[in-house]
Amino acid sequence: MDADASLPPLRELLATVARLRAPDGCPWDRAQTLASLAPHLLEEAFEAAEALATGDPEAARAELGDVLVNVVLLSQIAAEAGQFDLGAVAGVAAQKLVRRHPHVFGEQKVDGQEAAYRNWERQKQAELRAAGTPASVLAGVPQALPALLRAFRIGEKAARAGFDWPDRHGPRQKVDEELAELDQAVASGVGAAVAEEIGDILFSVCNLARHLGVNPESALAATTRKFQRRFQCVEQGFGYDLRGQSLEAMDAAWRQAKAAERPAGGGGPSGS
């Protein structure tokens, strides 16, 4: 990456955002606060992640640009309040990278990415302790993450600390145990117990996915897109009106939509 070549476009973006926030700028941009923009930053991050997953460089560039706009706008608002600016944000980020990569910027040696990750975690925990923050290995997993992804990251962090099954058979058995407990909860008729067991099943599936090398958030997103694609084919076959259609007729249409995608496989009302 040529840092010098990146500076003019960054300066242009900074100037553009400052203009939008000026007294005679855009009313919407001028009305924003750090709190009001937080959901927008999250939304843009998800859109960027989706674009990256498609492998389309043009879409990825555009969505990453939207994320950058939010970062610059947030920094501009903070600067106006005398808190920090984009330079301070970049400086803190660069310093953190140096601190947490002693095997690159210091004398430490590592053997592989796992050792590098452990270096990062050790330094992070030391920084938390120095700041008086509880130094749990789980402390750095954001509450704002989607629940499925957060469960995956929590399990991942706990496993790196040594709290894990030795192989995939442990979490696979746990899934069966939780399904049995769900059946018991359903039989009891207690809604809170049913909800708790559903949560336990999802968490157990996340752990199983981790042992199998699968990111459950990405896997579920792909399956949801597949379901949407096939469901829309079913809708199209019935003129986008499923009212009054029998389950058998819709099931047959689903199977036809599935067959058209071979060899992709997948699931639906008739199973996979």
Image (cartoon, rainbow, N blue to C red):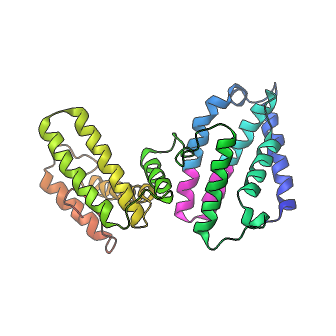
- Regarding residue 227, the answer to whether it shows in the image is yes
Q: Position of residue 116 (x, y in %)?
A: 64, 65
Figure check: 208 above or below 67: below
Mainly helix, strand or loop, the magenta region?
helix
Q: Position of residue 246 (x, y in %)?
A: 13, 50
195 relative position to 51: left or right: left
Q: Position of residue 144 (x, y in %)?
A: 52, 40
Quarter of the image that includes the C terminus: bottom left
Q: Position of residue 43 (x, y in %)?
A: 56, 43
User: Which of 44 and 148 lies nearest the eye of the viewer?
Assistant: 148
User: Which of 263 and 129 lies nearest the eye of the viewer?
Assistant: 129
113 relative position to 250: left or right: right
Q: How many marks?
A: 0
Quarter of the image that includes the N terminus: bottom right
81 relative position to 238: left or right: right
- Regarding residue 66, the answer to whether it shows in the image is no
Figure check: 70 above or below 213: above
Indicate the quadrant where residue 224 lies: bottom left
Indicate the quadrant where residue 250 lies: bottom left
105 relative position to 233: left or right: right
Indicate the quadrant where residue 192 lies: top left
Figure check: 201 above or below 270: above
User: Which of 27 and 97 lies nearest the eye of the viewer?
Assistant: 97
Q: Residue at x 42, y 61 (%)?
A: 210
| Region in magenta | 47-65
